[in-house]
Amino acid sequence: MENEIKNITFSNGVTIPQLGLGVFKMKDEKELSEAIRVALEAGYRHFDTAMIYENEAIVGQALKESSIPREEIFLTSKVWNYDHGYEETKAAFQASLDRLGTDYLDLYLIHWASANYIETWKAMEELYNAGKIKAIGVSNFQIHHLEDLMSHTEIIPMINQIETHPAFPQDELRAFMAQHAIIHEAWGPLGQGKNDLLTQSVLLELAQKYGKTPAQIVLRWHIERGIVVIPKSVTPSRIRENRDIFDFSLSKEDMDKIATLNTGERYSGNPDDQEFLTRTSIRPN
């Protein structure tokens, strides 16, 4: 079996590499630049950032310093909660482009479903129709958010980036998304190192069986489910290890074993946490 990173196709025909590098909380310029260099060498072409990560400029510069043409890179950023609104979103988008040093994005996401996300989406639709964004989507949207958005706008989100891992597989939301051709993208695909997910006996046994690490088993579980994954790491060996998941496949029986890890427990923020959504919608002075 070859080991090439597979692509997933959006509803509009644009493709996204199924594996990318997430850069959440990565602000050290030297460390992040090196992580991107290693990732590019290992074959990654998909990089996921956000305005609120405060590292778009580092990401843009590191990509520019590589010999990889811009059109071979898939670049994602996100609009933050206090930039919601029609004009605000247009300004935030341009600021992200400027920091990244590019004139278009492959994917732009609403980061959370905080107030005024309908107006934000309408601005994104316009930017998409103008060719400034190849695909538009959302992050951390529940079913009721998606239904609300779709009832007020023209374009159905092409992707929803949500917390997903074996302990929280998002089955109900995933089924809804599949009905509407919304791609499932997982953030925190390895459980963010919380709750000892990677030390579960099921994963240790499968790692031994397939000659892989528990992390590779979990990432392959996502791949088998047709999910786009963006594991975060600054460790060169981990970046390479996370890349090495396209040369094997899990049996249905083993997929079923991993399904037993479902606890229904989120490890991170709740998309319906109104206090968080309200607080983060206030622009700092």
Image (cartoon, helix red, strand yellow):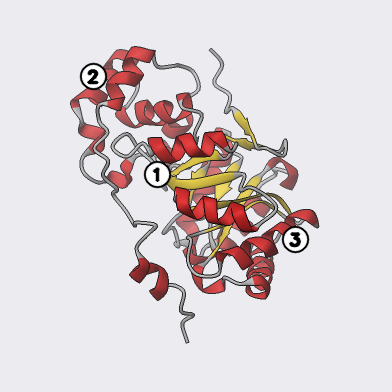
Tell me what residue is drawn at x 34 percent, y 15 percent: 210
Q: Earlier in the sequence, mark 3 or mark 1?
A: 3
Left-right relation of 19 to 237? right
Question: Nearest the camera: 69 or 18?
Answer: 18
State the image coordinates of residue 278 (x, y, percent, origin top left). 41, 73
One can see residue 141 in this view: no
Question: Nearest the camera: 198 or 152?
Answer: 152
The reply to whether discs 3 and 2 touch (Cβ–Cβ < 8 Å) is: no
Calculate the distance from the C-alpha at mark 3 to the C-alpha at mark 1: 39 Å
State the image coordinates of residue 257 (x, y, percent, origin top left). 28, 20
Q: Amino acid at mark 3?
A: Glu
State the image coordinates of residue 159 (x, y, percent, origin top left). 57, 44
Give residue 40's quadrant in the image: top right
Read off the residue under disc 1: 235
Left-right relation of 95 to 211? right
Read off the residue under disc 3: 126
Q: Amino acid at mark 1?
A: Thr
Q: Earlier in the sequence, mark 3 or mark 2?
A: 3
Read off the residue under disc 2: 205
